[in-house]
């Protein structure tokens, strides 16, 4: 019992030591994400292109690691080689033809948003008499509208919608981190005032 209390106290002390650093890191990361998000909102085509290139690079790097693993494990199964080779080809093609990559990412986002709308409507229906079901319907409608926007003008609309979607997400992520940093600063200020 005493060892559990000691471990809990040590965890709390370690957490308390991390909080001031977390506030500073959150502030810096939040500001950078907000700047990146605003830049992407102003230049959505550039953000779309960067998103496509970033995903393609991840595909290529991931496929190389997977191929190395398959080689070192001396795998004789064709499926162990097929997946990383397809990933390498996909990433390579997206790097060679980034605009096609943007269109592909746009199509994937449209399908994701359709699935999100469907699941939101199902959840809203299942909790309908309770509070909050309207927000799930609203979320479903917004996802459906975004998916429709992607699909109506696809592939041309992907050029600006992918960048706009990613930029808005980055902006709100940055805003959330900035809020966490501000709350941490306020907690530290209140703790100092009490001492």
Image (cartoon, helix red, strand yellow):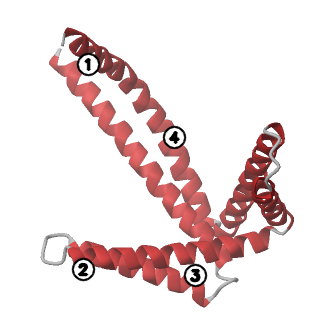
Q: Which mark is residue 27?
A: none
The residue labelled by disc 1 is 8
Q: CA distance from mark 4 to mark 1?
A: 30 Å
Label 4: how many Cα within 10 Å (few below 14, some 14–19, many 20+): some
Label 2: how many Cα within 10 Å (few below 14, some 14–19, many 20+): some
Q: CA distance from mark 1 to mark 2?
A: 42 Å
The residue labelled by disc 4 is 29
Do residues under tags 4 and 1 come within 8 Å of each other at their CB atoms? no
Label 3: how many Cα within 10 Å (few below 14, some 14–19, many 20+): many
Q: Residue 78: where, in percent of width, then height? A: 81, 57
Q: Which mark is residue 150?
A: 3
Query: Helix, strand or loop at disc 3?
Result: helix
Q: CA distance from mark 3 to mark 1?
A: 50 Å
For this orientation, the residue located farthest to the bottom is 152
Q: CA distance from mark 3 to mark 4?
A: 30 Å
The residue labelled by disc 2 is 125
Q: Which one is in front, 30 or 79?
A: 79
Q: Which one is in front, 128 or 99?
A: 128
Query: Helix, strand or loop at disc 2?
Result: helix
């Amino acid at each position: 019992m005493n060892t559990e209390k000691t471990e809990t106290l040590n965890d709390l002390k370690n957490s308390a030591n991390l909080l001031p650093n977390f506030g500073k890191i959150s502030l810096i990361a939040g500001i950078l994400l907000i700047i990146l998000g605003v830049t992407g909102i102003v230049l959505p085509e550039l953000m779309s292109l960067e998103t496509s290139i970033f995903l393609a690079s991840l595909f290529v790097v991931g496929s190389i690691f997977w191929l190395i693993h398959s080689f070192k494990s001396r795998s004789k199964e064709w499926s162990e080689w097929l997946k990383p080779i397809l990933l390498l080809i996909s990433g390579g093609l997206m790097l060679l033809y980034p605009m096609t990559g943007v269109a592909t990412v746009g199509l994937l986002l449209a399908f994701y948003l359709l699935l999100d709308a469907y699941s939101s409507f199902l959840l809203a229906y299942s909790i309908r008499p309770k509070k909050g079901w309207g927000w799930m319907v609203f979320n479903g409608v917004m996802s459906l509208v975004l998916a429709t926007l992607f699909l109506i003008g696809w592939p041309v609309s992907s050029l600006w919608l992918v960048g706009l979607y990613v930029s808005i997400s980055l902006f709100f992520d940055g805003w959330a981190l900035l809020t966490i940093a501000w709350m941490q600063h306020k907690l530290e200020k209140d703790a100092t005032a009490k001492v």
